[in-house]
Image (spheres, rainbow, N blue to C red):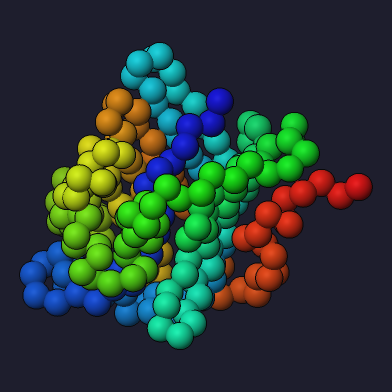
Amino acid sequence: MRKTFLFFLILPLALFAAEGNETDAALDKIGEKVKDLKTFTANFRQLDKDPLFMDESEHKGKLSFMRTVKDGVTNCFLRFDYLEPEKSVTIITPTGVFLYTDDMTEPQFSPSRDGNRADLAFAVFQSSDTMNRHYDVTVNKESGKKHSFKLIPKSDFAKSFFSEAEADFSDATGFPERLRQVKLNGQDITIYFSDHILNAPVASNYFDASSLKKTK
């Protein structure tokens, strides 16, 4: 069964302004490349390692992202269409998560239990203050890549989900190439992105439950 990737919402990590030290300078350079982002799509490959059951699995699909700003309020929407080996759809919105599989007649909705969950998930799309409240971000020197970062949970809420994460970004596009999350139970999930398309038109209901319901 597919594992949930709780931390994929860090996507364009450098959307917030940065200044000062080495990490901030690197983030700021990437941020210049994606500052006008409204939508993007990408293919993904997700590798899961579960130490408890000595299990490894691989999943493939397509990711779609939309960022809106209205009256000074930023909202972000993310959709994962899992295509292999099983089909399913996960849509993350500011108010909660939709989950849909082929055996469902209606999508399942799990509301955010409080504002903190949305705040944690979309921290990087809001402000540097929000980001820094939840994570310590440093350059990942061990990776040998130009734009690779380590993210260590700092807030109690972030610490309740995972122990550490990593993110690699393309120097050419500023978009994520690899995200890795280690959950508290030791589950290790890495997701790789390819074939980015920026600011393509997206249907108005694509991040809504109406896009998931079976046609009669």
Q: Is residue 23 left or right of residue 172?
A: left
Tell me which corner region of the image, top left, top right, bottom left or bottom right, holds residue 106: top right
Check the image and report above or below for 81 versus 42. above
The residue depicted at 33 percent of the width and 70 percent of the height is: 126
> Quarter of the image holding residue 172?
bottom left
Residue placed most toward the observer, 134 or 117: 117
- Residue 170, how many percent across, how many down? 36, 63
Residue 78 visible at all: yes
In the rendered image of this protein, does residue 65 appear above or below residue 15?
above
Total number of numbered discs in the rendering: 0
Q: Find the residue positioned furthest to the front.
A: 114
Percent position of residue 161, x then y: 31, 39
In the rendered image, residue 174, in percent from the top left (x then y), is placed at 37, 68
- Residue 117 relative to residue 67: left or right: left
- Whether residue 194 is situated above or below residue 184 in the rendered picture: below
Identity of the residue drawn at 77% across and 49% down:
213
98, 66: nearer the viewer: 98
User: Which residue lies most toward the top here?
Assistant: 53
Viewport quadrant of the N terminus: top right
Residue at 16%, 49% in the rendered image: 154
